[in-house]
Structures are given as structure tokens and as C-alpha cells.
Image (cartoon, rainbow, N blue to C red):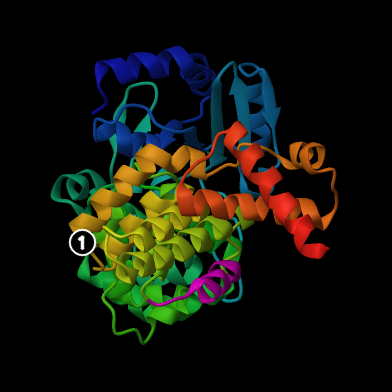
Amino acid sequence: MLSDDDRRELLERIEPLAAAFARAGHRFFLVGGLVRDALLGHGLTGDIDITTDAIPDRITELAAGWADTVWDQGKRFGTIGARRGSTTVEITTHRAESYDSSSRKPHVRFSDDVATDLSRRDFTVNAMAIELPGWALLDPFDGLTDLADGVLRTPSPPEGLFADDPLRMLRAARFSAQLSLIAAPELVAAVRSSRPRLAIVSRERIEAELTKLLALPQPSAGVRFLDGTGLLGDLLPPWRHADAAVPAAALDDVAQLGDPVALRWAILLGPVCDEAAATRCLSSLRCDTTTRKKVTAILRASRAVEATAASASAHDAAWRTAARRLIADYEPELNAATASLAAWGHELREPFTARLAELRAAEGTGLRRLPIDGHRVMELLGTSGPAVGDALEWLRTQQIEHGPLDAEQARTLLVAWHQDQERSKR
């Protein structure tokens, strides 16, 4: 059951609300991820979800006596939201819902039976409830046993649950990774046979679920689930007939490198996509523009790093110029690019990585910027328009060939270069 600390915190936050429902003769159950995570010893996570036998209008009346704010946008689905101070709750009438074959939006029927409500939930580990007051655990589908045994099962036949709401198949991938659960064989079989039902789910909902998976500390088990059931090829078509192995294990090793979601997308797409194909995949999933740009930048940098590593000896001047250009063009993505290459099995040789790291430490900051800007160029050279851009590009080339310049060095070089340009025109 919940720890004493969790109980005390919950009572501080919602005891008056639970008492109001009890006085009115209604049952009041904590449900959802909060119950699951608290039973796992993870503390109180996320919003507080409640189910009750009270109908929505009665919920609104009872919550109004406790909350600072009450909202009813979800009323037609039986859900009333309320907030008191920093505590947010969603209170939903017990439901017994059904779906039609063309939509994942339920036809809601209210119920007075909490067990019926729990039976419609996605997995047994999410189909547990704690009744207040009294703290009695209701676990009709042995979710607590499944948590202990590391098994992911559904509280009713999975084919029906996935037909009703196909997004649950992607949630199965996420929970297998998030909770270290192994999907039951019948669940895996149902996903394989139910894959076409994903067509009724919006691309935005699919992208949101995949992002939640890739944002986990260790998403590899979920990606293996997607691959093993065929979902990965459905969602990312270049994987359907790919010869490469999905680099799932590498996804767990990059949580500390910049934006882990963008990097994990790059690791997943890189073996089967160039930048253009990756952009098409992410666009089809309605990924946001920022993520798409980050992924393509990582892929572009990865190709550049690999080409530079193969182009010349790490001890000659040509290599140093190529490495400086790599730093100037791709410094923000270099760590992610190196991680991507390693994930794809393209390990870089130690002399290259050591010298590149040394050059980045010594010159990286200077190579990423010019010591003077366009306004200063106009003052120095008495020019404007495209000529300013030409001067800045020439100065950038000097830094790549010779190393970072300070403002005085840049001024001297630019003035001399400009004088040569003028003499050549005469």
C-alpha cells in the first residue's frame, strides 16, 4: 500500500474533498498513474485522478465547496476538473463506454460500478483504485501482482481494447519501457493483428505518444516492442524493408546529450534516411518544426563528421582546415552527431576524436563567431550591400584556414584584403 508519507500528503491535499463525497453518500476512488506509481514506491506523481458514482452535476456541486476553480469542459465524458491552490484533480463518473469502428471517441455510458469502470482501462497496472476514506485497495485484475512480476497485461481481451482505442498499442510500448514490464504473449499477438486500426488515430496523437516514449530515461524496450510487433515500420515506413538493425540499445545512452528526443529521432532515422527522408517522416507524424530542424541538423552534422574523419590524416594542415570548418559549421550538433555515428556502428578512430576534441577546446568558441560584425565592416571599408557579406565570408575563410582571430587581427587583414580588391579593379 501507500507509504505513510504519501498518505499524509494526499490527506493534506484532498481529505476535505473526499469527506464531502462520503458525507453525500458517494464513493471516492483514487485511480490511474498516481496509484500505480505510489504502489511502486515512486511517490505521488502527476495529477490526481478520481472516479466516483456521483454524476457530473453532483460532482460539480461537491467540488465547488472545496475548490478555488471548477471547470466542466469534459462534462459530456463525465469528467469535472477542479483546482485548490496547487492541487489539481479530475473527477470522473464511473463509466461503461463503447466505440464505433470508425472513431476512437467513446460513446459514454455512466455506471455505478467501479469494477466496470476499471475493466475499460488499458492495462491491469492502471486498473487499480484506492478508496477514501479507509485506504482500501481495489485490484480486481491483479495489477499489483503484474507489477511485482514485471508483466504488462490488459484487464479484458486486448483485441477489443485495441479495436476501441488503437493508441493503447503505443501506450503498451511506452509502459513496457517506463515500468520495465514484459508484454504478455496475448497482448503482443493482439498488437500485431490490430495494427491497421492505427489509421483512425490522428497523427498528432501518435506523435505525442512517441515523444513520451523517446523522452523516457531508457526508451529502448519500448522501441524494441514497436519493432517486434511491426508498428515501427508502420509509423516510420523506411524501416519496413530495411536491412539494418534498429539501434534500440543506443537510445538509452544519450539522455544527457542536449535534446534527447531529437537525438533519439536522429538515431532511429539515420540508418534508413537521409535528411530529406527524415524530414518527410517527421512531417507525416506532425512533429513540430523545432524538432525537425534539430534532427536534420544532427543528421547533416553526422555525415559531415564521418566525411571529415575519412578525408585526411589527423596530423596534416588539410585535416586541421577541414576540422575547423566542421567546428564552425556544426559545433552545437557535434556531440549528438558523434553519438549518432556510434549508435549506427560507425565508430570514429581515436586519433581523430582526440585531435578534434583538442581543437574544439582550444578554438571552438572563436570559430563559431567572427570578431567583427557587418556594421564594423562598413565603417572600416566604407562599403555596403553584398560587398559586406563578401568581406565577412572572406574573414570566415581566414579563420578556418588559420584559426580564430581577434578584432585587431581581423581589422588589419580586412583592410589589406580590401585594398588588394580595389587595386585589382583598376
Q: Is residue 335 magenta?
A: no
Residue assigned mark 1 = 349
Residue 282 highlighted magenta (yes or no): yes
Residue 181 shown left or right of residue 8 in the figure: left
Residue 283 spot, x, y in % from top left: 60, 68
Residue 361: x %, y % from top left: 36, 39
Against 102, residue 393 (above or below) is: above
Which residue corresponds to the image point at 39% horizontal and 24% vertical from the top-left? 132
Classify the position of the N terminus by image quarter.
top left
Residue at 79% x, 43% y is 381
Q: Answer whether residue 170 is visible to the viewer in this image.
A: no
359 or 252: which is nearer to us? 359
Residue 250: quarter of image: bottom left
The residue stretch that appears in magenta:
272-284
- Closest to the observer, 364 or 333: 364
Q: Residue at x 31, y 56 (%)?
A: 339
Q: Nearer the viewer, residue 202 or 13?
A: 202
Q: Could you tell me the amino acid type at mark 1?
A: Arg
Residue positioned most to the bottom: 241
User: What is the number of callouts on the image?
Assistant: 1
